[in-house]
Amino acid sequence: MQELATLECTHCRNRNYASTKNKKQNPDKLALMKYCKFCRKHIAHKEIK
């Protein structure tokens, strides 16, 4: 079942992205390299609750 996951910038802590993930196939937290418009660079974004 797909679930909505909010992604937070690890540097400035802004919540910039929302993504879907399958909790059965990926039970661990999502971490992606995404562009942060506040930092103006590509930084790791991690899933938050």
Image (tube, helix red, strand yellow):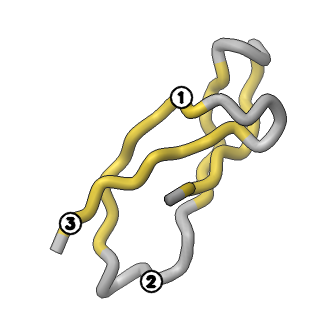
Estimate the spatial distance between the alpha carbons at disc 2 and disc 1, rounded to whole Å.
22 Å
Estimate the spatial distance between the alpha carbons at disc 1 and disc 3, rounded to whole Å.
20 Å
Asked if marks 2 and 3 touch (Cβ < 8 Å), the reply is: no
Q: Amino acid at mark 1?
A: Asn
Q: Position of residue 4 (x, y in %)?
A: 30, 54
Q: In what element is the residue under mark 3? A: strand
Task: Residue at 78%, 17% (x, y): give it.
Answer: 39
Q: Quadrant of residue 3?
A: bottom left
- According to the image, label 3 marks what residue? 2
Q: In what element is the residue under mark 2? A: loop
- According to the image, label 2 marks what residue? 27
Task: Residue at 63%, 53% (x, y): give it.
Answer: 46
Q: Quadrant of residue 33?
A: top right
Residue 25 as seen in the image, left or right of residue 2: right
- According to the image, label 1 marks what residue? 16
Q: Amino acid at mark 3?
A: Gln
Estimate the spatial distance between the alpha carbons at disc 2 and disc 3, rounded to whole Å.
12 Å
Q: In what element is the residue under mark 1? A: strand
Crowding around mark 2 (Cα neighbors within 10 Å: few <14, some 14 to 19, many 20+) is few
Q: Amino acid at mark 2?
A: Pro
Up-down relation of residue 2 to residue 8 (above or below)? below
Asked if marks 2 and 1 touch (Cβ < 8 Å), the reply is: no
Q: As drawn, which residue projects farthest toward the right?
A: 11
Residue 13 as seen in the image, left or right of residue 35: right
